Amino acid sequence: MGATIEFCFKAARHIDGLTPAVRIWLDENRDLTLQDEEELTVTKTTGALEWRATKWLSTFDTERMAYRVTFLVGASVSWLLTVTSDSPTPHPISQKADITLYPSDSVTGRLTR
Amino acid sequence: MSRACKRALVGASLVVASLVAATSARGDDPKKQSLTVLLPTPVDAPAADANLIFTSDEKRLTLSVTYAFPSLVSVSARISAPLDGDSRIARFLAPGNPAFEGELSLGYDSRRAMKWRTEEAARVSLALSPEERTFEDLKLCEANQIEPCSQSQIVRWMRDEHCRSERGCTNAQLERVAPLQMAMERRNLLVSNIPSTLRNVEYWVGGDLAVGYDKLGVYRNDLALAPTDVTKYDVQLGANAALFLFHAFAINLRAGGEVARAPSLERVERCQAIASTDPTVTGRACDKNALFMSGALPAAAASAYVRFALDYEFHKSKLTRQDIIPGVEGRVGVERLGQSPSLDLRFTVFFTPVIDPIAGQFGVGVDWSYALETSAARPAGQTTVVPFAFVGARPAPILK
């Protein structure tokens, strides 16, 4: 049993046309190779332009753990991504503000401790 | 069957929201079983709705089921039956006395197709390429301090900054970026590869097959004789197209042909004296709803129909889980073209209270029919007006 981390996406505005799809892969093995079982499916928060996904890790050490997020949304929609860990106390371990991605783009990053 | 048992059956019907009551009744033309043009074609499948329709001369139970195949075609089946007033059981359940109407619609639902194409594109396009699985872009970003590390950002950096240096980009550098760009473009292609007709116009186009059947006990030519079975039926085959505008306004056009045998029946009060040994004591047993027919049985006749409907449901910009959707519908149709045509109008006012995941259906309306030519059943110029009310249930609309 290890830390619990949570990905939270917040869109700046509603996207017309397509239903936004967000998916997360987390390289928990830290081998820079993604497996299908490392995929996280996010759920939309009711009444808000917000998507959340929770992952229970087998370790408390999140240092340099890579993640990838794919987006399928309209163009020119900015996002705020916050990754938090509950160990030892709730704190952010990655934050990306004002990300504007092209449709079907993906973004990668690494977690901190 | 005991009265308690009959009541239990009625209660069960209520539970499944498929109710009714009634007097003696008969099968009618199939179009009257679909109450609005919006309801029979839900996008979310499978879907079902049930209605009880009350008119001045009958109560009718209608059950509809719609199934949309995963991609393009949806099928809607609808069956209705008049209910017997005494037993309160749908007459088609009674052995030897069936009466029902059935309708099968098969068609292409652009709203369903659009939903499926979008979901399919999203599913496929979110799959990762080998380069994405091995974080080639993250390695590139960390080596060149590219932030945020998105593929479009890498392509932009390569094009606008890195390759504009004096020496430009090497082939090896370009090859490293190309797969990332290709993965992005592959996804874009899948998303954009949805026909513009699906994006811009919502419609349903297909065909209807409708059947109505009723077998009635009728006194033929002589009220004193025992009643004989008279069969009434119609079969309709036609095209059905609906255009949905602004998600709430629907235009529906149906045209087709019909083969029907419709004997002209008259409702009479038939009374029989009850035997009595005392002449001062008399009595009569009467049937107020006896059906009488004079003359020979008519042959089946072919005719055509054209029906047009406008339907509007008032939608707020955002539907909530507990909401009320009012709506109106107007229909105009010319029936039995080629035989004894009539002009039929229908106006319905309804509202749909939504308590997710169930939506109710309540409405009132009036059917107005005007005989354009004289037939065995009615003279030219005769008008009939039949008010009706309905109550039912269906799944809640998709919350957007």
Image: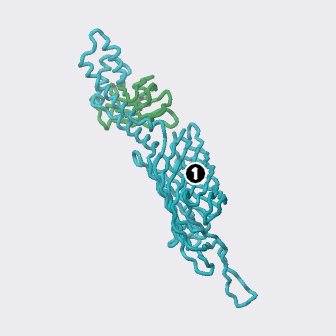
Residue A4 appears in the picture as rendered: no
- Expressed as whole percent of the image width and height from the top left, the position of residue A106 reads 36, 28
Q: In the image shown, does B193 or B240 lie closer to the viewer?
A: B240
- Expressed as whole percent of the image width and height from the top left, the position of residue A5 reads 39, 32
Q: In the image shown, does A18 or A33 lie closer to the viewer?
A: A18
Q: Which amino acid does label 1 sit on?
A: Gly
At horizontal 61% and vertical 66% (from top left) the residue drawn is B376
Q: Residues within 10 Å of mark 1 (few under 14, many from 20)?
A: many
Which SS class for mark 1?
strand
Residue B57 sits in which quadrant? bottom right
Instruction: Give left or right: position of B163 versus B61.
Output: left
Residue B86 appears in the picture as rendered: yes
At horizontal 50% and vertical 73% (from top left) the residue drawn is B96
Q: According to the rendering, which colour does chain B have?
A: cyan
- Expressed as whole percent of the image width and height from the top left, the position of residue A93 reads 40, 26
| Number of disc labels | 1
At horizontal 55% and vertical 51% (from top left) the residue drawn is B307
Q: Which chain appears green?
A: A
Q: In this view, does B52 lie above or below A90?
A: below
In this view, the residue farthest toward the right is B280
At horizontal 59% and vertical 68% (from top left) the residue drawn is B264
In this view, the residue farthest toward the left is B172
Q: Mark 1 points at which residue?
A: B360
The quadrant the N terminus of chain B occupies is bottom right
Q: In the image shown, does B44 or B367 lie closer to the viewer?
A: B367
User: The disc numbered 1 marks a residue on which chain?
Assistant: B
